[in-house]
């Protein structure tokens, strides 16, 4: 089969590799019909995550058709259409039983690696380093899905892939970020980062009762989507002297009640602390660049909540814990407990409450994935979200594909 393989920093290649096979009785093989490149894949692309190996297949946002089942998977049939959650969970351990799916104790065969870094291991993830299980990802024609009796969500016929694909990660993740804010009716919610997860956090903040949403980014196309689709007030942080001052002014000195960091470890910034992070990270003196987290802590109103859904990998420097402690902030964070959210959020899509395909700007054949990675990383061509379709004819033969938010891509 064809698959998108990591071959080193910023070196993605589409290679022919062996088809996956059933290894365990609870496995399924899914023929992938749609898959996406995620902002967190860019941390891999940019070489910021340890324990990738040459030839690893990336991708954790995918859906498709079940083509083969292990003998213990009774709830699915060959031919079923499914969306697969990016976190892998057994459904039977202490954590799965507590509804904490992304903390499953049985799905990371390389738990020892994660334990060294974090004390304990989170769940395994598709296509996301050997430390997270070394599972082949879904940017491919086929994928093996472990614990297929627990994870994959069946999708009814008659609704197109693009509307449901993001149940695999970014819609539940944005929702989780907003839910973790414990929004009270009328609250002002500030969202750092208007990438796809930020967009879904904005949508979800409204669903959960926000009175006002303020979104912060620097890319015009993302701010525009936040403003139009997301009905958010927006701040272009490159156009203002101080995001903190602007947020204070906008909230009568109080600060936003709830702050969501939808950026994570590779925050870009123009402030002194952001430049300092870049130097330290380049010199390998720190692993992450937490500029956004610092700003969220400083901006948040006293007694408010800071919710983190942007991915952090390791050690953060100069995080103002003094401010967080003395202002009585609540922190909530984590990888999304996917299995908790997929079904209820599918209902919202089916009843027309939200059309997740609005974030898609680029639709590519799988052979165009390396171009897709670069374009998404560099935010060129107004790129917000790339969907790969393995069954597109991807041999340099391009068609114009109409973007969900009005953008049009012609190569
Ligand atoms: Zn993702
Ligand atoms: Zn489990």
Image (tube, helix red, strand yellow):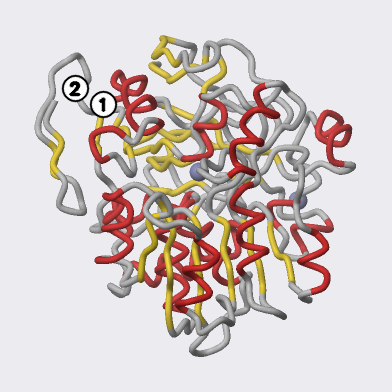
Q: Which residue is mark 2?
A: 393
* 354 to the left or right of 106: left
Seen in the image, is 194 located left or right of residue 25?
left
Q: Residue at x 43, y 20 (%)?
A: 4
Q: CB atoms at circles 1 and 2 under 8 Å apart? A: yes
Badge 1 or badge 2: first in the primary sequence: 1
Residue for badge 1: 365
For residue 213, above or below residue 340:
below
Q: Quadrant of residue 228?
A: bottom left
Q: Is residue 62 shown above or below 213? A: above
Q: Position of residue 247 (x, y in %)?
A: 50, 71
Instruction: Name the one closer to the observer, 356 or 258.
Output: 258
Tag 2 secondary structure: loop
User: Is 300 drawn above or below residue 313 in the view shown?
Assistant: below
Is any atom of residue 166 visible in this view? no
Q: What residue do we see at 38% from left, 37% from top?
A: 35
């Amino acid at each position: 089969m064809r698959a998108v393989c990591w071959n080193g920093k910023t070196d993605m290649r589409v290679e022919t590799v062996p088809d996956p096979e059933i290894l365990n009785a609870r496995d399924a093989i899914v023929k992938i019909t749609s898959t996406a490149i995620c902002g967190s894949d860019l941390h891999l692309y940019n070489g910021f995550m340890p324990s990738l190996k040459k030839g690893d297949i990336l991708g954790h946002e995918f859906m498709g058709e079940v083509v083969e089942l292990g003998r213990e998977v009774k709830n699915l049939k060959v031919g079923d259409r499914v969306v697969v959650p990016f976190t892998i969970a057994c459904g039977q351990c202490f954590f799965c039983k507590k509804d904490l799916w992304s903390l499953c104790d049985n799905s990371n065969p390389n738990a020892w690696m994660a334990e060294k870094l974090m004390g304990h291991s989170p769940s395994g993830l598709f296509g996301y380093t050997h430390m997270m299980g070394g599972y082949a990802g879904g940017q491919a024609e086929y994928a093996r899905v472990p614990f297929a009796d627990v994870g994959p969500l069946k999708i009814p016929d008659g609704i197109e892939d693009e509307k449901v694909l993001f149940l695999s990660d970014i819609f539940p993740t944005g929702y989780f970020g907003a839910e973790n804010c414990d929004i009270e009716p009328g609250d002002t919610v500030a969202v750092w980062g208007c990438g796809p997860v930020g967009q879904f956090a904005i949508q979800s903040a409204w669903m959960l009762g926000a009175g006002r949403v303020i979104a912060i980014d620097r890319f015009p196309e993302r701010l525009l989507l936040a403003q139009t689709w997301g009905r958010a007030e927006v701040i272009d942080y490159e156009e203002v002297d101080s995001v903190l001052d602007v947020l204070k002014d906008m909230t009568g000195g109080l600060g936003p009640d709830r702050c969501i960091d939808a950026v994570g470890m590779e925050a870009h910034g123009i402030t002194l602390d952001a430049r300092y992070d870049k130097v330290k990270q380049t010199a390998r003196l720190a692993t992450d660049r937490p500029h956004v987290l610092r700003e969220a802590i400083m901006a948040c109103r006293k007694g408010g909540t800071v919710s983190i859904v942007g991915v952090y990998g390791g050690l953060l420097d100069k995080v103002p814990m003094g401010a967080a402690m003395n202002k009585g902030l609540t922190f909530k964070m984590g990888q999304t407990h996917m299995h908790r959210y997929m079904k209820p959020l599918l209902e919202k899509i089916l009843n027309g409450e939200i059309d997740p395909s609005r974030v898609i700007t680029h639709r590519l054949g799988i052979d165009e994935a390396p171009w897709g990675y670069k374009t998404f990383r560099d935010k060129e061509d107004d790129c917000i979200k790339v969907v790969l379709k393995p069954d597109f004819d991807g041999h340099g033969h391009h068609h114009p594909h109409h973007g969900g938010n009005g953008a049009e891509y012609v190569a």
